[in-house]
Image (tube, helix red, strand yellow):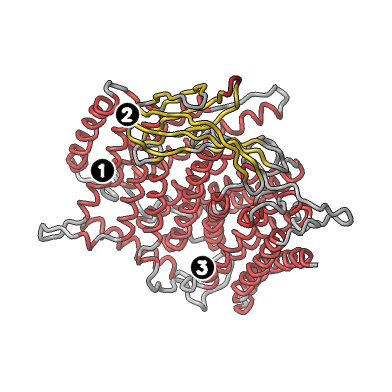
Amino acid sequence: MIPELGHFALIIALAFAICLSIVPLVGIISNHQKLITYAKPLTFGMFSFTAISIIILAYSFVTDDFSVKYVASHSNTHLPYYFKMSAIWGGHEGSLLLWVFSLTIWTAAVAKFSKDIEDVFIARVLAVLGMIVVGFIAFTILTSNPFDRLWPNVPMEGRDLNPLLQDVLFLIHPPILYMGYVGFAVAFAFAVAALMCGKLDAAWARWARPWTVAAWVFLTVGIALGSWWAYYELGWGGWWFWDPVENASFMPWLIGTALIHSLAVTEKRGAFRNWTVLLAIFAFSLSLLGTFIVRSGIITSVHSFAADPSRGMFILYLLAITVGGSLTLFAFRASNVASFSRFALYSRETAILICNIILVIACITVLLGTLYPLLVDAMGLGKMSVGPPYFNAVFVPIMSLLFIVMGIGPLIRWKKAKKGELRKQLSSPSVMSIFIGLAFPFVYGGEFNAWVTMGITLACWVQLVVLKELFNQTKLNNGRRSFARLTLSQWGMTIAHSGIAMTIVGITLVSIYETETNVKMIAGESVTVAGFDIRFDGVKQVQGPNYSADQGQITLSKNGDFISLLQPERRTYLVQTMGMTEAAMDAGLFRDVYIALGDPLSGNAWAIRVHFKPFVRWIWFGAMLMALGGVCAVMDKRYRRKKEKVIPTKASLSTEKCNDDVILQSSMTESMAQSVGKQS
């Protein structure tokens, strides 16, 4: 009976979502204020019943209710309780319910924390989000119901969770990644609401910007955790493989990065309005495309959830309606929007625009590499694969150009740079970057390497320029300096760009200097790899809660000094009888020694794979810094202070017009930005 309550709660949530997508808009059209005020209560009702639904699914897992088909397919009585919680999103049906729940969390958050935005505008935003929720709850109920029963043939035991997903990180990685994926729906909803209103002004950008940055932070952390999981769980020693599902999350991240910078220009200068709206549409569209790739069955990946083409078609229809409808609305509205901000070629606006274009081009290259094999297969031209060689050959040069332009943006003025000023600002960072880049491969590797020089030069360029801009911002009129005058947004930009520089260093050095050694060893033998002494002390049998394993005993030392005991495992899971490699690592800030236990060989020997990976953790540390920079930007006081309602409550509720106070507010914002630009 309890699972049926979860199903029923989901149906009620669908009813709330339908009402949310209709009632407020009817109120706006009919100039009925009371109907508009229903938007927030309907949102909270939709969220509450979706939460009840996912809580009941969790209860079914904890109580081992194998009469529920989804529970029987992804759990087992021997599965630890914490993995039973991660099993909630370990398959297609449950992960889709998590997708819906994440969307209702964002919708409820918008309703809760948008008290200072006029009711008419926020009602439009919530209605758009309600429409998206309708589509995905309908998808869940009609094609992917996690509460389907197995009556009367109820199994005594479940099939167990996929061993690849039996990892503590899987408890937090999917929810965080989904919050990033789904969070771009908020930026999309704000953009569509602004198009409905017909006023794409600075006020809209200001409202949407913190929500967009928050979604970008979640997605950044989610991608980093996914990379970390692939590194230590899959046992292959890599951190990124250009897998189609990895690309599915990376593409909206690239467009989202362009979007948060474009929103800053729209907010501060009133420019890029149409471009910003398009980026908001494309960011969420790519999130939907990623959902399609993961759930359609058109690709095979350890990350994919489903192999049912009918489910893929449902998502494809949702994608077509979302993209088609929003672009049609954009086509009707965009022609009436003109930017009142002019800027010169040598300006920060131009630098940001160039960065945006490069990010979009980079996204297109990833999109082509991901979809081209699928199109070739669909047209009956055979099967082919596009792997790392293509992406590395195309993506690396594009991103190198991006990093060069990134170094110019922070130091150039808004609107127009003074003659000779930019050259003066960039001279010292460029000279220092080139010097460090040339010297580093000799100091670290003992010989010149062009790729290392390029990577380190770009990393130093990005880092030194953003530090110089931070230093410039501390200068007071009396010539003294004070860091107290810096805003959280300025700190956020510095931290995020520093994270990018750190990631560049990590990617460059681990790609060039990593080593992999495959050895055959018997107990008592030793080998030396990258200056480390590795002694194999044999294998012992260990028993886990739902698996048995051969556990290697490997002593790591250097110059006779003991460092650590590493215990890589070869696991065999009892129910699915699937073999898994659990690598062991001795980690440090500047290097990882990564050891995986292979298959047993003749003569009591074992195959052992040893990786030496310099600076590999800088990749994930850099990603965390990027996310921290985003958090600082979201916490800036200008997004927390009491804002004026730029559209009066008694304003006209026409779908074609918003109150002229919006224009007044955006003009005031533009005037203030110009004044600040002149003073700086």
Vertical comparison of 383 with 60: above or below:
above
Regarding residue 405, the answer to whether it shows in the image is yes
Vertical comparison of 398 with 229: above or below:
above
* Amino acid type, residue under disc 1 in the picture: Val
Of marks 3 and 1, the one in the foreground = 1
Q: Residue furthest left?
A: 478
The residue to which callout 1 is attached is 465
Residue at horizontal 40 percent and vertical 31 percent from the top: 510
Query: Tag 1's secondary structure?
Result: helix
Taking depth in this image into account, of 569 and 227 the one nearest to the observer is 569
Residue at horizontal 44 percent and vertical 73 percent from the top: 645
| Quarter of the figure that contains the N terminus | bottom right
Left or right side of 93 for 238 = left
Taking depth in this image into account, of 30 and 549 the one nearest to the observer is 549
- Earlier residue among tags 3 and 2: 2
- Earlier residue among tags 3 and 1: 1
Counting from the top left corner in percent of width and height, residue 276 is at: 47, 51
User: Tag 2: Cα neighbours inside 10 Å, few (<14), some, or many (≥20)?
Assistant: some
Counting from the top left corner in percent of width and height, residue 260 is at: 43, 52
> Answer yes or no: do the residues labelled 2 and 1 have beta carbons within 8 Å?
no
* Amino acid type, residue under disc 2 in the picture: Met
The residue to which callout 2 is attached is 454
The image quarter containing residue 122 is: bottom right
Query: Tag 2's secondary structure?
Result: helix
Q: CA distance from mark 3 to mark 1?
A: 42 Å
Of marks 2 and 1, the one in the foreground = 2
Counting from the top left corner in percent of width and height, residue 526 is at: 43, 25
The residue to which callout 3 is attached is 658
Of marks 3 and 2, the one in the foreground = 2
